[in-house]
Amino acid sequence: MKSLLSHAVALTFGSTLLATSPAMAAMAPRADNAWLSQVDAEARSQRVSNVAYQLDFTLTGKETFAATTTLQFDLKDADAPLTVDLDKATIKALTVNGKTVAPQYNNWFITLAAADLKAGRNTIVVSYERLHSTNGEGLHRMVDPVDGRVYTYSHFEPAAAHQMFALFDQPDLKATYQVNVTVPADWVVVSTTRESSVQDTQGGKRWTFPVTKKLSPYNFSMHAGPYKMWGDGSGKYPMRLFARQSVAAQIDPAEWFKYTKQGLAFFDGYFGIPYQFGKYDQLLVPDFLYGAMENAGAITFAEARFLHKDKMTTDQRHTLASVIMHEMAHQWFGDLVTMKWWNGLWLNESFASFMGTLGTAESTEFKNAWQYFYSQGKTAAYRLDESPGTHPIEVPVPTTANAFDNIDAITYSKGASTLKQLRHLLGEETFRKGVHNYLVKYQFQNAKLDDFIGSLGEAAGRDLTQWTQQWLYQPGVNTITADYACKAGKVTAFSLRQTAAQAHPVLREQRVQVALFGARGKTLALDRNVAVTYNGASTEVPALKGAACPDLVYPNYQDWGFVKVQLDDRSAATAREDISKVSDPLLRTMLWQSMWDGVRDGALPLNVFLQTALNNASRETDYALLGNVLDKVRGGHAYLERMAPQAAYTRRTAQALEALAWQGVQKGADANFRRRWLATYIELASSREALERLAGLLAGRGVPQGVTIGQDVRWNIVEKLNERDAQGSAALLAAEEARDKSDTGSAAALAASVARPDPQVKSAWLEKIGDLKTDLPFSRIRTAMENLYPASQAALAEQTAERRLAQLPELDKAAGPVFMRSYAATLIPAACTPQSVQRLADAAAKQTTLSAGARRALLARHDEDSRCVAIRKAMTVPLD
């Protein structure tokens, strides 16, 4: 991947590269680099309005494409130069208001001289050529390894539209788009609108699209290639689904259309505003950077997440439904009404996460969507919010380089949790009314946080200024504890005690439910449940006086609040002993999380937690919760492998967990449960017996009744065998690679090969990862990063730890934020030793010029490593 930052300043005209003169540099209206600052964006939007683009592309399937952008806009004044964004293109011709001019171009933006501009309507025409992207941004190109067909798609968030065409690449300059595309004859083209004509041309076809409604640049899209298309007209809006020809057999379009139709009906009703983009297209695309993207009327989804060679599990279908709903919510909140600048990105994502979960729970079969939200998103937000990497929900974004610095669990899940909390605080219908009024008032415009909060406050008749300051501008998570006394079997006093971390001492107002449970034979029965709005350090709950003295108290019942729960001693003991007696799956989920929080906080020994899991996991009857518990079991096992892989306790526990998982494979309630247990067994396998059993499953030996070893499972097994260097694993990898020549097969083979415990393999791949000029697609580099050092290879990881940490500043400076988000999350070394913790502390003290995102990742890794050391210290069994 080529560096996104370059210190060379150049002009490109035709095929000639010319140096920028000092005089030209002196008149530059903004910083001479790849990023747009908020200050410069605001200055440009004060002068520019009424923007319209006509885009003409010629795509051949080759590595470059040709295009012409015709840009029309109103200009308030012609007193100063104006910039138009265009990244790394070879400009063939530039006309400004009908006059041909020599481009003043630095590979990132064109500077239009004031003398060539005029107050009023201006027309700019830029003809250029450009390489397709291979990093998932701009106009990405991929060659299918199965059949050699070429596919392209666009991705522009946060500010990458200028990697495809010339424009004002900022969200508050909304525009209309008219698109014409010439492509090979067997290609289809998908964009924001449906095509108005497709005409034969020499050697291909020309697709013409009508003018769109006003959109921010990052919400517009254009995708082209020989995609297979499925259609469904059974709903209010026509629906289509697209995917590569070679993967079509892996897709169940009926599932996609079912959830899409359900979601469109739900959101039309909830928002009280009909869907605005006429048709609803969805595309599965390769090498995608994220899970999905909400392009207006043409949503893209990552193949890696949504292609399954085996029949989808319930968990996978839930993921499909929830992501469809998330991106659909954006069609109103994000596309119809859009933030003014990237500091508002959190609100887009938080709202879509909240509404996506609500839509999933209320319009699909996944009525337990909030349980998934808690276990998969909210708990991650708690972890981040109590770490040194925390930050307020609303943060400044100085430039487009920082747009994704804070795209994390706080942005998505804490933000969504605050909206969920606010809905409970204001009332469900009041909240809905405020959202409706906001969307009506600002449709096809840009808005700020104050506009949204103001609309909710107006609907509620309440000033939300203090709430906004507490929740959106202050980082950190609070903890609540039930503080009560009993006498003669009755509660005599009850209060909620709220605490905050010393670093972030704010105490917050929110509304929760406090539930009291009593033992009734084989169940823990709900005796009393009251809603409480608490504030400050202590809040009395008089409604609970006189209630039966509880065996268990949970002061955030049904998960209304964003707050960690510290169980009182009696409740904690009840949870460890009797968690299987709790009938409510969401409450069981939260009790498991409270125990896991205790492990991570050094209060509950990891060995006690793992024994609780060994005693209870096989009794779990809720499919979603079982997955959550098994995730924690795998996390506990990974801690042991990093701490002391050869310790007798580690080996004994690993064997006990293997036995637990294999029993689940054999006796799981149905195919879904057995698949879940099998995935856990594969992940935990470390003994020679377990690895031999996995090799047997590949060969069809010893497969339990009701278990299918499909292609996805086969690759999981092959990767585990290679990670553990099991006998014959390299040959099994080669055989599986020959068996599955698909793109996903190639990615799985790469994951397995880099996971092999071979120092030469690790070193070679570190060289490739560090080579920013590599021809490998970034998706492959990211796969290597994610699989290079599994937890079982702590000693191997230590061999290159100093090297990886030392090169962090250099890579951070040269590689750009897309690369660094993956590198920092996977390759900053942490070894769960005091020495490793100190090494990270020294690096944080020394490497003070890191970008905000990289520095936060370094601090978070230091915090996690410190926790690992504390977890080891808290254990009550020997590891030496």
Image (cartoon, rainbow, N blue to C red):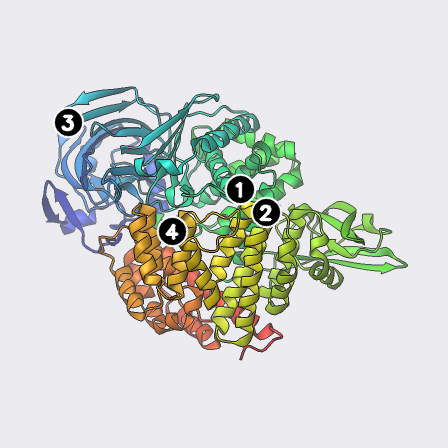
Label 4 secondary element: helix
Front residue (pair 135, 575): 575
Residue 427 location in percent, x, y?
Answer: 66, 36
Between the residue at mark 3 and the residue at mark 1, the CA separation in whole angstroms equals 46 Å
Q: Which residue is mark 1?
A: 314
Secondary structure beneath disc 3?
A: loop
Whether pointer 3 and pointer 2 mark residues with C-beta atoms closer than 8 Å, the reply is: no
Does the rendering let one see residue 100? Answer: yes
Instruction: Name the side, left or right, on which 613 lies relative to 745.
Output: right
| Residue situated in front as seen by the camera: 830 or 685 | 685
Q: Are marks 3 and 1 in contact (CB under 8 Å)?
A: no
Q: Which residue is mark 3?
A: 203
Q: Amino acid at mark 2?
A: Tyr
**Marks 4/3: CA distance?**
43 Å
For label 3, count other residues whose C-alpha is less than 10 Å away and answer few (under 14), some (14-19) or many (20+): few
Residue at which label 4 appears: 402
